[in-house]
Amino acid sequence: MDEAALIADARRGDVEAFNQLVLAHQSKAFNLAYRITGDSDSAADATQEAFLSAYRSLSSYRGGSFRAWLLRIVTNACYDELRRRKRRPAESLEEMEEASPTGDGVATEDVFFAANEGPEASAERAEVTRAIERCLLSLPSEFRIVVILADILALDYSEVASAMGSPVGTVRSRLARARARLRQCLEASRELSGWEMRLAEERSS
Amino acid sequence: MSRLDRLPPRDLERLSAYLDGDLDPREAARLHARLESEPELRLSLDDMRQVVTAVRGLEEVRAPRNFTLRAADAVRRREPGFAYLRFATVLATALFVLTTAVRTLSVVPLQFGAAAPVAESATTAALEMFADIAGAALPTSEAPLEAEAPPPAAAAIPVPAGTAAPAPTLGGVVVPSPAPSATGCPSCVPSLAYRQEAGEDQAGKTTETDEEEIARAAQIPGGPTGALAVAQWVLAVVVVVLAVLTVRARRRR
């Protein structure tokens, strides 16, 4: 059954139809929440709250990308959740590192590290992942969200704009500035920890 | 400062959009040409590409559970809505403020309307004297502002908080409790006789001082003023209760 039909059924009160939409979108919704809050429990609560809220306000969905509409509700739910817990996203970084579902072995593609790496390289890779997550969480919220939506969830510009309630031009400039800030933060991390970006070496060779 | 921070904002946006394939063909061709001839721009593009690749390389996290709804959860709970509570709180607060204002201002109109010309003249005299007293209470102050006027004695005024508006205007005079029940006749029209008796009761210290006259003018018990006092107290309680309920409802949302 296609998405439009499921939405129509859900609007008529069919919870099962809505649940099919939930299953289709819950991964992206949870990932957005996790990257905004930096904490698995808060992200799960916010995601659940967002789906409940989405079901109850289906009448306000006016067409367009259902996923973008949903992710906007998730974003708002995340901020409600953070307010409830009276914590700033950056403050939950330690918890995020401890509880990270990615553990200590996150694939950050071959840009930084070769496929066949030793224990040293593996540790370095984990450090890079932590640095990226830390830098992401250190961004102001409007920059963080645009990076999450565009680069992590791979939404196109128009969907990002829809999910953020901003014009495409704003998305474009925010994304560029956010990437520049991330670069600056990662360079600072590299100086502190001493690790090198593999690509930089490749480029110079 | 990184290389990207030194880039003009327009170029930063162009590089970012270029990496996302979001430049139109003409703009992309122009950027290609520049990248050929500007090594610094090329390095900036590489810098940004690294960042984008790094962030995109973050592994997708697995949701700890399904977020499907149960039919029972999906039904909206029938609890007092936050919006209604908030409206009720605002309304009750407005009524409280209105009651306070009316009660504060009613000292003058009540006497005009109900207490005969004697009361009228007494009020007028009291108001005139207040000006003198306020001036006298602060001899060093050229402009005795109301906020500065109440000396420590003002704290002894036994008037409920939030209803004390008339008292501080008395320039810090110690005012006895209004105590409507003391008259034994809550609906009595305030009379000069009462005020004279009250004045004699107070006469231990001085007789018919300016302060006492003003104090009496401000505390006419019973009648509409007494009813207003009760309403004021009830509204104060209602406002507090509604505010608490509203805050709790807000947290539940």
Image (spheres, coloured by chain):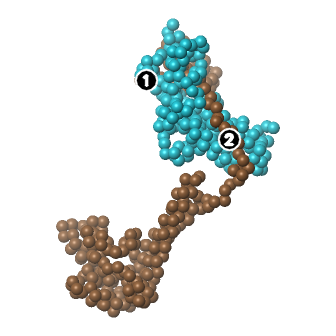
The quadrant in which the N terminus of chain B is found is: top left
Chain of the residue where label 1 is placed in the rendered structure: A
Expressed as whole percent of the image width and height from the top left, the position of residue A123 reads: 51, 19
Mark 1 vs mark 2: in front: 2
Which residue is pictured at 41% across the width and 79% down the height?
A: B106
- Res B85 seen here: yes
Q: Is residue B163 above or below residue B246?
A: below
Residue type of the residue flagged with mark 2? Phe
Expressed as whole percent of the image width and height from the top left, the position of residue A174 reads: 53, 32
Expressed as whole percent of the image width and height from the top left, the position of residue A26 reads: 67, 37
Q: Secondary structure at mark 2?
A: loop
Near mark 1 (Cα within 10 A), the count class, few <14, some 14-19 or many ≥20, is: some
Q: Which residue is mark 2?
A: B67
Chain of the residue where label 2 is placed in the rendered structure: B
Residue type of the residue flagged with mark 1? Ala
Q: Is residue A82 above or below residue B107?
A: above
Q: Is residue B201 left or right of residue A116?
A: left
**Residue found farthest to the left:** B140
Q: Nearer the viewer, residue A169 or B49?
A: B49
Give chain A's shade. Answer: cyan
Q: Which residue is mark 1?
A: A188
Q: Which chain is brown?
A: B
Q: Is residue B219 left or right of residue A128?
A: left
Q: Nearer the viewer, residue B217 or A95?
A: A95
Which residue is pictured at 46% across the width and 73% down the height?
A: B233
Q: Is residue B96 left or right of residue B160?
A: right
Q: Which mark is residue B157?
A: none
